[in-house]
Image (cartoon, grey):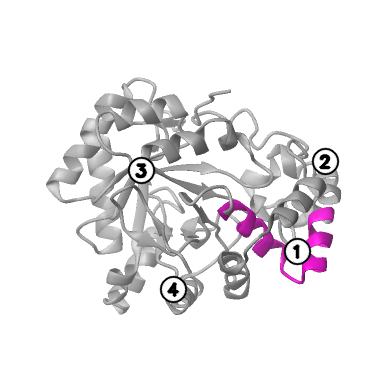
Amino acid sequence: MKLRKLGKDGPEVFPVGYGAMSFADFYGETNEANSHAILDAAIEAGVTHIDTSNVYGMGKSENAIGSYLKANPSARDHFVIATKAAITRDAEGKRCFDNSAAHLESELDKSLARMGIDCVDLFYIHRRDPRIEIEEVTETLAGFVRKGKIRSIGYSEIAPSSLRRASAIHPVAAVQSEYSLSTRLPDLGLVQACAELGTALVAFSPVGRSLLTDTPLSLEACGPLEFLTTNPRFIEPNYSANIAATDRLRALAAEMGIPTASLAVAWTLTRGEHVIPIPGTRSVSHFRELIRGAEIELTKTDLARIDEVLPVGWAHGPRYNAAQSVGPEGYC
């Protein structure tokens, strides 16, 4: 299996990584033992890239990784670990973004302490702070590289033009963006800019927050989940329309004899050798379905059939509501 590079000069990683937001309680309750079982399965399968953030469970995700590394010291050499910072709260408790050097370094130091490591392989700006130019922020990140606290830099949810500005200051190893059969915006410039600049496109939610799986979350299951209970694609009438639309993909996957999640991940991998999907799950069996996508070679005929059942623009409702849309950069 051909590995993929996390940036032009970065390490080679398994084609599919793991999104450790699922180590927090974002999609339902979990615990440390369950998270450790996922990491055991990742090592067994050869999965190397683990993606987390300081705000996933307000440190819960990073703590789970840290306790695992403490119990399994050799695992640090196996995993390529990414984390993020910049999402915070103002004095009134309102969500905001802080790209100042002092805030980023303070949060980075806390992340390193939680994971029990002295250097993270990749450090992202989780969201841009409109008060600070990206060139200045990139200089800050480059300083963390020089200090030996991080090995490479990245940005989450930025526009291609912002990537080019940052890359003129320092190589950007990765840009993270939602990208899947249900969210195709990166096709309109970001996929191409990343390829041009030698930047990995790390695709989160490659199975559409469960819509592109054999067992999409029910409306009842979405109810207790703050993010999904107000997300346009998971409220009626959009929810039922999206289930009906993705039933066509489930039927195709069944005809091909593979799990729908595997097919969705395999499609993402066809978008370029620099694309690295990072699905998340709390289930070891589902994790194995997700990474199975790396084993599937889709033909031109397969891709044409996928486009037929889920043509561009099929999804009902935007990927985020108005509040959730604050932060990601628009570029089309």
Q: Nearer the viewer, mark 4 or mark 3?
A: 4
Q: Which mark is residue 214?
A: 1
Q: Amino acid at mark 1?
A: Asp
Q: Is residue 245 left or right of residue 199?
A: right
Mark positioned earlier in the residue sequence (2 or 4) = 4
The Cα atoms of the two marked residues, 3 and 2, are separated by 34 Å
- The residue under label 3 is 124
In the depicted structure, whether residue 210 falls above or below residue 323 = below
Q: Element type at marker 1? A: loop
Question: How far is the residue under mark 2 from the one under mark 4?
Answer: 40 Å
Residue 234 locus on image (x, y percent): 74, 44
Residues marked 4 and 3 touching at CB (< 8 Å): no
Q: What residue did someone put label 4 on? A: 46
Ranked by sequence position, the earlier of labels 4 and 3 is: 4
For residue 236, which numbered disc appears in the image?
Answer: 2
Residue 99 appears in the figure: no
